[in-house]
Image (cartoon, rainbow, N blue to C red):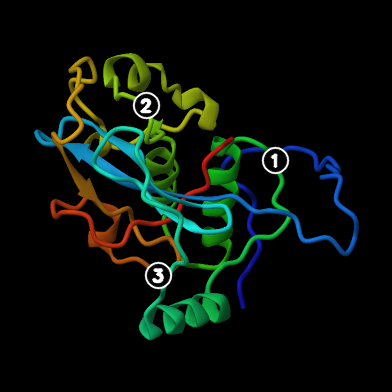
Amino acid sequence: MSTKRNSIFGPQPTRQTFHLGFAENDVPQLFCQLDVLRRSEEAEYAYWKEKARWVRFEEIAENVLGRWSKPHVATLMQTALLDLKNLLTNGVILLNVQGTDLPTLSQTMVQALLDANYIDDVDKAQKIVWILGLPHFHHHEKRSVMKTASSVSLSKQGGLHPSPSFVINHLLRRDDEVDNSQDMSAPHLISKPSTQDMTVPEHNETNGTAVPSAK
């Protein structure tokens, strides 16, 4: 049984009731977005990039800036459904989460993983929150790491200080070419991670972890 521990991120925001304006029996339209963690070719900086989105149908980001595939019904392999069943059965599920911004949501999610003993080290938890707070780019945005990444403030995430192995050097290097990047999977937040899962992998994109994007 998991033990509730004090938050390592300080006091959490007070819950405020928010009404979406839907009738009780109505099904609200849900927007879902998948971001993947990428790095520059020289591995000098990392960022989150919009990869796919779902409103009613699935759309995949194409190689051309701002262009999406035609909306289509997404198909899943049986193994993916079994993985989903396992995650719903054994994973950490957060409903009606407090907070309205990405830093607060990241801290809440990681704190829940700590409480459920999926993470047993506070330093690792802080690294995950820091990774989730890296710059996010929409598919239509031209990347300007010099302008965007340099404006990221760790103070918004409770004054976290990542270890030197996670410090991104040379943030002033500009990257304006769409294809000069390699995909990189994020740490698996639902499965209990090993030590290797806590470091930024060197391989290309595999299965990216879905991260909520503030709208």
Residue nearest the viewer, comparing 38 with 51: 51
What is the secondary structure assignment of the residue under circle 3? loop
**Quadrant into which the C terminus falls:** top right
Q: Mark 2 vs mark 1: which is more N-terminal? A: 1
Query: Which residue is denoted by mark 3 in the rendering?
Result: 192
Mark 1: give few (<14), some (14-19) or many (20+) Cα within 10 Å. Answer: few
Q: What residue is rendered at 26% in x and 38% in y?
A: 166
Secondary structure of the residue carrying numbered label 2:
loop
Residue under pointer 1: 12
Residue depicted at x 53% and y 72%: 91
Q: Residues within 10 Å of mark 2 (few under 14, many from 20)?
A: few
Q: CA gap, disc 1 to disc 3?
A: 25 Å
Residue position for label 2: 141
Q: Quadrant of the N terminus?
A: bottom right
Query: Left or right: 144 with respect to 68?
Result: left
**Type of residue at label 2?**
Glu
Please name the amino acid that badge 3 sits on: Lys
Q: Measured from the top left, where is residue 32 in percent x and y?
A: 54, 52
Quarter location, residue 188? bottom left
Marker count (numbered) = 3
